[in-house]
Amino acid sequence: MANLKRYNEGLFKLDTWIRRLLTMGDTDLLHTALCDGVCDIVRAEAAAFTAIEIKDGTMMFSAASGAWNQMVKGVRTPLKSDNLCASVAACGTPIRIDSLSSLGRGSCELLQVMDMDTALLVPVFDEEMVAGCLSAYRVGQPFDQIDEQILQQYAHTASTVLRNFRLMEDLKHHAAMLEEEIEERSRAEETIRQMAYYDSLTGLANRRLFNDRLRQSLALAQRNKRLLAVLFLDLDRFKLINDTLGHAVGDRLLMAVAKRLRNCCKREGDTVARQGGDEFIINLSVIADVNDALKVAQKINDSFRNPFVVDGHELFVTTSIGISLFPYDGRTGESLVKNADIAMYRAKEQGRNNCQLYTPEMNTKAFERLSLENDLRRALERDEFIVYYQPKVNVEQGQITCTEALVRWQHPTMGLIPPARFIPLAEETGLIVPLGEWVLRRACRQNREWQEAGYPPMQVAVNLSTRQLQTGNLVETVERALDDSGLDPRWLILEVTESIMMDNVDSTLQTLRILERMGVQIAIDDFGTGYSSLHYLKKFPIHSLKIDRSFIRDITTNPDDEAIASAVISMARGLNLRVVAEGVETVEQLEVLRSLDCRYMQGNFFSKPAPPEQVQPLLGKAASSYLNFGKWC
């Protein structure tokens, strides 16, 4: 009766522990609970669960009861013939040891650290293979047949729990892998979507997404009879930043520009996109009238007043904006974008840093501009450019001291095109660099030819553009022009504007100093319209200043212009610089300038720009008689 009662109590505990094992959510906790159940069910003082790898010939202690758990957990040893767990794995039946003292210590690794008398080991099966061993240990009383039966039943039921637990773990693992695969696929799809519809640099919508949204906005605007606006933006002189500071700085500037544009267009339904390069485009999906579009454009221009700080560089950037409206300027997305682009170019023609509304007349001008650009690209090859020369005169001595080389374009069908029409286009397209070099070489050669023909030596002045200064090979270009023509460097003047010098001060300063050491003279053109910094006048190797024609035009009637001219002349004399007044058109202007002690002048009053064959007779006569200087000399 006592044995039956003990057996029933053991079965009750077995059922309790099996239920507990089923609640375990972690492998380590399951194995530890398995050992604690052994101690409780068969009243053992220590227990262990050993995982057996028959194929590998190893065994590993997965868990042990009580304080032994941390000591033996994870210990892996080879299956040896004299090892008790190896014996259980080999025979697949329980083993009872009444006296552990009769066995060697190598029979059980736990015996090396435990002081126990008896042991009971039962196999744990998995698919009819021994996968582990449950070991129970006591001090004193040996284990009997009832203990063996109960522990065997516990091991059998536990093997099912372990197998199910492992299957659940596998399912969780596969579910996690599947979830990760789904997430990875979603990320890949999102990446593909980003690449397909968003600009990789700025994160703005790209052209494809913009066109899709514009089509949707047009459909709504047409249905609801509402206005819609498209804004086309282009950063002014962005290429100069790329050329001088590098594309990395240019890219980071574009990212900063994109951020400001987002802040200016936060309404739901509006789209800001990068069209490409330094061009951006905005869809204002709903506007009440044209003023709404103009307000957004003004907000953008105002936001650009603050400098962009990129890699320690403080960059002042402006933008030209063109605006087209639905339905007045187009009923399709393509026509609205095209017309906004045309209006943007009109903004650039108007001096940049402004916005222009599209007008139908712009289309004609756009086609003319495109045609002119195409012709301009071939004009140099076809030898359509000619150089005109305008004298600079010393009115005190009645002498021509210099001629300024001014390029003209003799178009085969449009006739003589003034520089105001094609020079900005050449600057924008980069054609100004080869054109500028051609003018320099032609002017040096012409001046040398005049000297060789016996005319009095004089200087020739050639204008430099921003692009020429920033190419990095201006010095070599000037050297070649001088060497090929045989002209002495002292007879060459290079004219630069104040704004050009300020574009990249350090690089420009270095280039100009090298040219000065060569013997070439440097003049500041259009003085008074740019920075007009006394510091830079002192810093740069300047030899002469040209007072801008805007101060000469009204010098006889505007006291402010006269005061400015007088101040420039006095300052230049103090700095030992020559002053040239350009744009002199009347005798009254000449008289005022002479009264201010301005000795050098240039303008149509003396001679309009003319081709070499028309200037040459002037060089062969007494300047005072040819130019009627008698009354001023």
Image: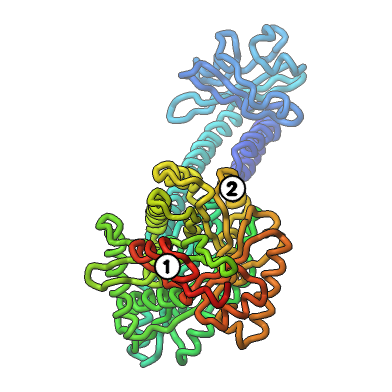
The reply to whether residue 186 is in sight is: no
Residue at the (33%, 71%) spot, across then down: 417
Labelled pair 1, 2 in contact (Cβ < 8 Å): no
| Count of marks placed on residues | 2
Q: Helix, strand, or loop for circle 1? A: helix
Q: Kindly indicate the quadrant of the structure image that contains residue 29.
A: top right
Residue at left offset 55%, top offset 77%: 631
Q: Is residue 444 above or below residue 318?
A: above
Q: Residues within 10 Å of mark 1 (few under 14, many from 20)?
A: some
Q: Amino acid at mark 1?
A: Pro
Give the percent coordinates (x, y) of residue 186.
43, 55
Element class at badge 2: helix
387 lies left or right of 399? left
Describe residue 358's horizontal placement relative to residue 144 as left or right.
left
Q: Quadrant of the C terminus?
A: bottom right
Residue marked by disc 1 = 424
Q: Nearer the viewer, residue 177 or 258?
A: 258
The location of residue 521, given as percent across then percent down, is 57, 53
Residue placed farthest to the left in the image? 413
Q: What residue do we see at 64% from left, 22% from top?
A: 75
Query: What residue type is disc 2 on?
Result: Glu
* Residue that carries the numbered disc 2 in the rendered image: 516
Please say if 499 is above or below 247.
Answer: below
